[in-house]
Image (tube, rainbow, N blue to C red):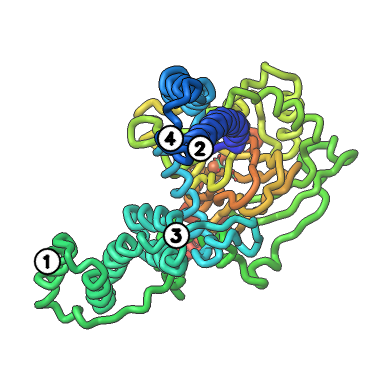
Amino acid sequence: EFYSSVHEMTKVFGYEQKMLQHMQKFVADNQSKLDFLRARLGEFEQERNEAQHWGTAYFESPLNQYLLSKRLTVDWRRVENLMDADTGQKPLERLLKLRRNPSMPNASELEGAIDGLLRLQFVYRLEAKHLAKGILDGVNHGTHLSPEHCLDIARLALRDQHPRLAHAWLLEAQERLPQHPELHPQILALLVQAKADVGDFLGVNGTYQELLKLQPASEEHARNYEQFMRNHAAKDGLYESKIIEEHAPIPEDPSQLDEFQAYSLTCSGHRGLTAAEERHLRCGYMTETHPFLLLAPLKAEELSHDPLLVLYHDVIYQSEIDTIRKLTTNKIRRATVVGTNQSVVSNVRTSQITFIPKTEHQVLQTIDRRVEDMTNLNMDYAEDHQFANYGIGGHYAQHMDWFTQNAFDYELVSAPEMGNRIATVLFYLSDVAQGGGTAFPHLKQHLRPKKYAAAFWYNLHAAGGGDTRTQHGACPIIAGSKWVQNRWIREHVQSDRRPCLLWDDSVATFGQIMELAKQQKAAAKKESS
Ligand SMILES: O=C(O)CCC(=O)C(=O)O
Ligand SMILES: [Fe+2]
C-alpha cells in the first residue's frame, strides 16, 4: 500500500511530474487556440467597426460585399472548427492513463494517510495547532494545511472515535475560515458531534445556536437540534460545560493504562525507567559467549535483566546492508498479522515485509554466524530472514513475537515442529529521522533505531512459556523511513544453549524458588524432629 512505503511514494511522485508535463501541454495547446481565436476576434471587430463607420454606403462597394461574404463563410467556419476541436485531447488522455496506474493512491489510501497522521498525533501527543503549521514534534517541515485539509482530518478523527483530536482540528479549520467562509456550516456541524462525544453539552447547545443563526432555513439543523434537546432535556448534563483537552490526561496510576496507551507513552518518552531502576544496567564489551569474541568483542548495552534485553552496537556492516537492499528490491509486500484463525492485513501493522531464506545469499549466513556469537543460540532452524520497511506513520502496535497456542492450533505457525520463538534479534538497517523507535512498555524501555545496531531478547521463559513482559511495538515513523531485519530463533536444538528450567520461572524467580526450597526443608526437618 501507498502509505506503508516511502519507496512507493517516490514512484508516484515521479508519475506526478509527468502528469504535470501533460497538463502543461494541455494548457499550452489551449492557450495557442485561445490566442488564435482572440486574434480573429480582434480582426472581425475591427472590420465591423470600419463598416459601421461607413454606414450603409459600405455595402455599395463590391469589395466589401466580398469581404463580408468571405468572413461569413470561410473565416467563421474556420473559427467554429477550431472552437469545436478537442484541443489538448492527447495530453489529457496521457494524464488519465497515468492516474489510472495501479500505483496511484486511491480513496482508501488517502484515508490511510490521514489515519497515519492521527496515529502520530495520538501516540506522540502532538497538537493539531502545530501539525497544521507543518511542525512535527518540534521540527518544522514547512507545510501548511488549508481549512479543507483540517476539516478532512477532523471528519476521520470523529469517525474513528477520536473526538478530542477532531475537536482540535475543527478549531484549526475555524481559525482559517477567512480563507474559505463557505466551510463554516460544515465545521460547526462536526463541532456539534465532537462536543457531544466528549459530553460538553453546553458547548453543543451553543454551537447549534451558532449553526442555526448561520443557516436559519436548514431543516436538517433544526431537526437535529430538536432531537438533541429531546434526548437531553431530561438529563442533568445539559448545562454541563467541559474543557476539551486535545489529549486525555496521563493517569497517575500506571495500572490504569490500557496496553495501547502504555505502548504510546513509551514511544513518546512519557514512560521510562527511573534513575534508580537504570542504575543496575551496564554497558561494555562482551567476550563470553564465544572465544572469537576475545578478538572482536561485542559492544553490548543491557536494557533489562529479567527478561533479558540487550542492545548490541555495530553488528552489521554497510556492505551487508547494501547487499540486503539489492536482495529485497521489488520483493516487499504489505505485512499481515495473525488474526484469530488467519493472517490479515491490519492497521495495527503498517509496514512492508519480505522473507528471504538464508540459502539465497552468503551474506545471510554470515549474519547468522554473528547472531550465534551474540546469542549463543543455534541458528540452524531459525526462520527465514525477515526484512521490513516502514514509511511515514508506519508502525506495529504492541505485540509479542511468540506464538500463542491458538496460532499453533489454527496451523498459522510455519514449521511448528521447531517450537516457539525462543528469542528475537532485531537489526536496525537504517537510522530514522524522527520517531520509529521500538517500545517495550513493560520494561519501560524505548530503543531509538540506530543503524548497525541489533536488539536481542528472549521471548520465552526458560521453562518454555511465553513471556508477556516482552511485549513490544514499533513506534510510528514521524519522518523518514525505517528498515529492520528480524531473526526469529526457534526452541528446537537450544537445550544445550539455554537449558530448560525445572521450575516454572514465569511464576517464580530463582531466588523465590530457593527460598521456597529452604522453607520446605526447614519444615520437613521440624516435622521429623
Ligand atoms: O520494527 C521494530 O522496531 C519492531 C518490529 C517487530 O517487533 C516485529 O517485526 O515483530
Ligand atoms: Fe516484534
Residue shown at 49% from the left, 32% from the top: 44
Q: Give the residue at mark 4.
A: 106
Q: Give the residue at mark 3.
A: 147
Query: Is the distance from the Cβ of mark 3 to the nearest ligand 1 atom less than 8 Å?
Result: no
Q: Please report whichever mark, 3 or 2, sits nearer to the chain's N-terminal start.
A: 2
Mark 4 Cα shell of 10 Å, populated few (<14), some (14-19), many (≥20): some
Observer able to see residue 7? no
- Name the amino acid type tagged 4: Asn
Residue shown at 70% from the left, 55% from the top: 302
Q: Which mark is residue 227?
A: 1
Q: Secondary structure at mark 2?
A: helix
Measure how far apart labels 2 and 4 are at the Cα level: 58 Å
Q: Secondary structure at mark 4?
A: loop
Measure how far apart labels 3 and 4 are at the Cα level: 22 Å
Q: Is residue 212 left or right of residue 125?
A: left
Q: Secondary structure at mark 1?
A: helix
Measure how far apart labels 1 and 2 are at the Cα level: 71 Å
Closer to the camera, 24 or 29?
29
